[in-house]
Image (cartoon, rainbow, N blue to C red):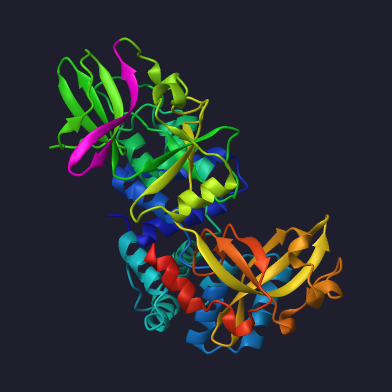
Amino acid sequence: MASLAQAARLATLLRRDAEEPVRFQYKHITQFAEKNTSDDVAEVAEFFYGHRVMGVDRLMATVSRCVGIFGEEWDGLLDSVVTGGHALVPLLASESQLRPKHGLSLSISEATLLLYDLQKRDEAPRVVDTIFRRIGREEATMLWSRALGEYPPVGKGKFIRAVSNMTEYEPNHLRQAARFHGIAAVVKGALDDSLPRAHQLVAGQPFTPAAYRRWVKWVPPFEQTAYDVVEGARAFVHVTPDGTWVFRRSGERWSPCPPIDGLQACEEFVAEVEERHGRLVVVDILHTSDEPQRWKQPVTERRPDIRLLRDRDHLISLIKNLQRGTSLRLLDSRSPYYDGEGMGGYIAPDSLFEITLLVTRARLIDGQAEVCLSMMDGFDAQHVACVRCDTELIRVPRLRKEITTRWSEIEHLGVVVVCFAFGYDGETLDGVSVQRIDGSLGVSDTIQKGDLLAMSNAR
């Protein structure tokens, strides 16, 4: 099991040689891989490039509350960082000693759990105190970098290329696989030589399936967009003269697997299946003895029963009616199972909120209106989005004289708009679309943060 100290030492070496030829950084990663297991390297890669634990504003508020720094003093510290062009991570790490007298040794998994405790209000003071007093500066730099999701020791692309240099996998293949499997699984698979080869669909062998990006826009992604409602776990059935196997999307063998419906009588057969009511049902045939390249056919030919998305309203209606545990794939009706980059399409958001937000600022720009929107946290307005909309949506008497090409502060007017949004991450709203101003509503009708969090958690 990799330790935080090992990860921090590697990170320090990588940052130290950032201005040197790239082979120096590759050398450090290679030496680390030679001295440790593939699991250790994968764990470190995940820690380097994992999702942030919290945003800067929330972290600043947490740290200042825990160490008793006045807001003005904290703002002064941050201004000095911004003015000096330095990252926030070194500023936070500087509060830790180089080598604490009673230092704490953590594994990567223990360090990750410690950071997630930072999100808990009751635990945050203990976590901040632990990092400042018992974690060395080198390790603290690694922790704060992971918490904020910034200041990585080396770019993800360089790390992947270093792994490629140690294996027989091409960098582009590893990058494509990482989009779907995540960097940890790809690093481990490459070092163990167990990663499926991309775009080699061979019956009896697991392959890297199509990946799907997240779609957060209000229009269909393609000129002719097909949609696929995923109601259960997807996997792939392989039939050869030697037997029948089912592989999960991760490449792991599904054994024992449920009964399978929809198999064809042929020597070789590969198809995507979906788990429904304790059985696996064939939904997309990708390879047969007679059509070994069937996956290259457009989805409308492979699946004649697939449905097309009509328009924006149809997309919104589908998202609104998604059942818990289901997802909506958006596919190019004229494209193969996956394109040259291994992409199969998009995943639509799994929820849609209709909420009321307070307009706090507005201006005109490029023929559109731009508005800043806030929810309420008790009696305080808290910013959640800044979006553009049609000027007609905000042409009401109260705003007619207020909105110009410069930002206007209009929170005091109590203008409330009805919006659609795809989700809330605790700080900002995704895919906000202003629908209309509701003159019958006031500030007290603006959605509260607690209600928005409850809606998010319900999905």
Q: Quadrant of residue 265?
A: top left
- Front-most of residues 268 and 399: 399
Against 28, residue 150 (above or below) is: below
Q: Give the magenta part as a residue range.
A: 274-289
Of residues 403 and 50, the one drawn nearer to the viewer in this rendering: 403
Query: Is 67 drawn above or below residue 41 in the view shown?
Result: below
Name the residue at 12% across, 37% down.
256
> Between 389 and 60, which is closer to the camera in this rendering?
389
Residue at (45, 19) in percent of width and height: 297
Task: Give the percent coordinates (x, y) of residue 311.
Answer: 58, 42
Decide if residue 158 is on the left or right side of residue 321: right
Rendering coords of residue 24 (x, y %): 53, 42
Instruction: Specify the farthest residue to the top.
Output: 290
**Residue shown at 40% from the left, 23% from the top:** 302
Q: Is residue 149 visible?
A: yes
Count of numbered labels shown in the rendering: 0
Quarter assignment of residue 190: top left
* Magenta stretch prevailing secondary structure: strand
218 falls in the magenta region: no
In the image, residue 275 lies in the stretch drawn in magenta: yes
Where is residue 230 drawn, in percent x and y? Answer: 36, 43
| Quarter in which the C terminus is drawn | bottom left
Residue 178 in view of the camera: no
Q: Quadrant of the N terminus?
A: bottom left
Would you place residue 451 above or below residue 312 in this image? below
Looking at the picture, how far across and down is residue 88, in whole percent? Answer: 59, 68
* Extreme-front residue of the structure: 440
**Residue 440 shown left or right of residue 274 in the figure:** right
**Which residue: 22% across, 24% down?**
263
Who is closer to the viewer here, 438 or 124?
438
